[in-house]
Image (cartoon, rainbow, N blue to C red):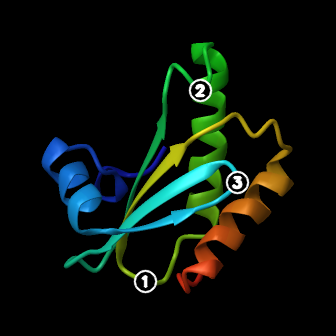
Amino acid sequence: MFPKDKRLKKEKDFKKIYRYGRRAHGDFFILHFLKSGDEKSRFAVVISNKVVKKATKRNALKRKVREILKSELPKSHFDFVFILKKDPGLEFSELKKKIAGLLNERNITFS
């Protein structure tokens, strides 16, 4: 789990990112991101009940994505919302490559 200062939780933050931010589409994710005024990046991972029915599987996917982001936090100061649009069914290392590829595609560098 991310520390509180690294999490997006407020509805107004999500709305701001969706309205003014940029988007990147991958095979399994839609990434919404917006340059933040803070000196830290903040994250949210969203997986709908329609995409993954079982709560245990949904939570496991969220934990995997959070762990990938935690281990390789972007240098840039952005707010990110990762929305899973379909179940990837990938191993951890493959999922990590997909997320890194999506961020590199948008020139968001990892530390």
Disc number placed over residue 76 in the picture, else none: 1
Write down the residue under mark 2.
51
Labelled pair 1, 2 in contact (Cβ < 8 Å): no
Q: Residue at x 59, y 73 (%)?
A: 103
Residue 4, percent from left and from top: 31, 50
Q: How far is the residue under mark 2 from the one under mark 3?
A: 14 Å
Mark 1 or mark 2: whose residue is earlier in sequence: 2
Circle 2 SS class: loop
Circle 3 SS class: loop
Disc number placed over residue 47 in the picture, else none: none
Mark 3 or mark 1: whose residue is earlier in sequence: 3
Residue 35 occupies which quadrant of the picture?
Answer: bottom left
Labelled pair 3, 1 in contact (Cβ < 8 Å): no
Q: Name the residue type under label 2.
A: Val
Write down the residue under mark 3.
27
Q: In the rendered image, which quarter contains the C terminus?
A: bottom right
Labelled pair 2, 3 in contact (Cβ < 8 Å): no
Q: Residue at x 18, y 44 (%)?
A: 10
Q: Residue at x 75, y 40 (%)?
A: 88
Q: Residue at x 20, y 51 (%)?
A: 15
The correct choice, above or below, for 32 with respect to 22 in the image is: above
In this view of the protein, which residue sits in the foreground, 6 or 97? Answer: 97
Q: How far is the residue under mark 1 from the one under mark 2?
A: 30 Å
Q: How far is the residue under mark 3 from the one under mark 1?
A: 23 Å
Residue 94 occupies which quadrant of the picture?
Answer: bottom right
Q: Name the residue type under label 3.
A: Asp
In this view of the protein, which residue sits in the foreground, 26 or 34? Answer: 26
Residue 56, percent from left and from top: 63, 17
